[in-house]
Image (cartoon, rainbow, N blue to C red):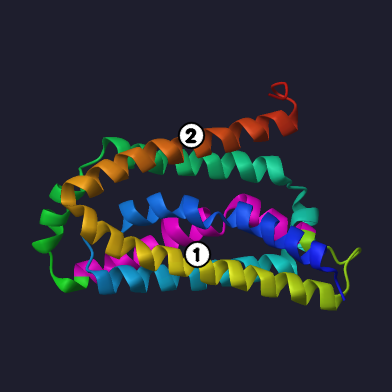
């Protein structure tokens, strides 16, 4: 039976790489203009998709990555670039109020399509099931080092972190209703800057791991 310190260590690791708080700006921008019901559906769908992606990496990731010769730096750089491009749309794109006005004119079917799409990209991947999260679950369930019981415990911890992520995303909509359209537009741009910084940091750490630039 893993010790409490081991459980806590794995929880912290998975919390950091899944980053529920860091997913908020992506969720706010991606669901702008959607009804609260559709936003909650997008959040639930994203978490479910992320769960199956990470579960697939737990079951098959080690074999696939070893076969392809891929490592964490490659995933970090690719994921960082994708998140940076999305952050730019948050900063320089239309503000939330104008985006909402455009959405009101669209039929409900279009909003449902947007909810399904944003749940897959960028929410489920690469925000929740980030490159770091994929590699982390592979390393934490290494078949050569950990028993099946330990791997099952890691998967359970992952589920707990994903459920917390879902609760945080659901709480974002009531917060947006309180701060209003102008506040939401400001938050979206500020969060875009934060997300851009996170993305750049991921790319730089990938370059450090490869040895292109010195550690900082």
Mark carried by residue 197? 2
Q: Which residue is drawn at 30% across and 45% down?
A: 188
Residue 163 % position (x, y): 53, 72
Q: Which residue is drawn at 30% across and 63% down?
A: 173
Q: Residues within 10 Å of mark 1 (few under 14, many from 20)?
A: many
**Residue at which label 1 appears:** 165
- The residue range painted magenta reads 110-139
User: In screen coordinates, is 34 left or right of 119?
Assistant: left
In the image, residue 111 lies in the stretch drawn in magenta: yes
Q: Please say if 99 is above or below 189.
A: below
Q: Please say if 131 is above or below 50.
A: above
Q: Residue at x 31, y 39 (%)?
A: 189
Gap in Å between the C-alphas at discs 2 and 1? 21 Å
- For the N terminus, the quadrant is bottom right
Residue 133 % position (x, y): 64, 56
User: In screen coordinates, is 75 left or right of 9?
Assistant: left
Displayed quadrant of residue 210: top right
Sequence-wise, the earlier of marks 2 and 1 is 1
Q: What element carries label 1?
A: helix
**Which one is nearer the viewer's eye here, 206 or 109?**
206
Q: Please say if 193 is above or below 168.
A: above
**Which one is nearer the viewer's eye here, 210 or 198?**
198
């Amino acid at each position: 039976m893993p010790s409490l310190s081991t459980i806590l260590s794995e929880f912290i690791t998975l919390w950091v790489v899944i980053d529920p708080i860091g997913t908020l700006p992506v969720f706010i921008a991606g669901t702008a203009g959607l009804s609260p019901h559709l936003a909650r559906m997008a959040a639930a769908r994203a978490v479910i998709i992320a769960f199956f992606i990470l579960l697939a990496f737990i079951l098959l990731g080690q074999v696939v990555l070893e076969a392809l010769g891929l490592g964490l730096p490659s995933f970090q750089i690719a994921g960082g670039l994708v998140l940076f491009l999305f952050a730019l749309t948050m900063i320089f794109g239309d503000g939330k109020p104008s985006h909402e006005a455009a959405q009101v004119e669209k039929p409900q079917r279009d909003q449902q399509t947007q909810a399904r799409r944003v749940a897959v990209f960028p929410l489920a991947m690469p925000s929740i099931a980030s490159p770091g999260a994929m590699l982390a679950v592979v390393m934490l369930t290494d078949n050569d080092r950990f028993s099946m019981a330990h791997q099952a415990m890691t998967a359970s911890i992952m589920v707990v972190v994903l459920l917390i992520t879902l609760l945080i995303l659901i709480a974002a909509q009531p917060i947006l209703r309180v701060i209003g359209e102008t506040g939401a537009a400001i938050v979206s741009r500020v969060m875009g800057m934060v997300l851009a910084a996170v993305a750049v940091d991921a790319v730089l750490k990938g370059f450090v791991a490869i040895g292109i630039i010195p550690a900082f």
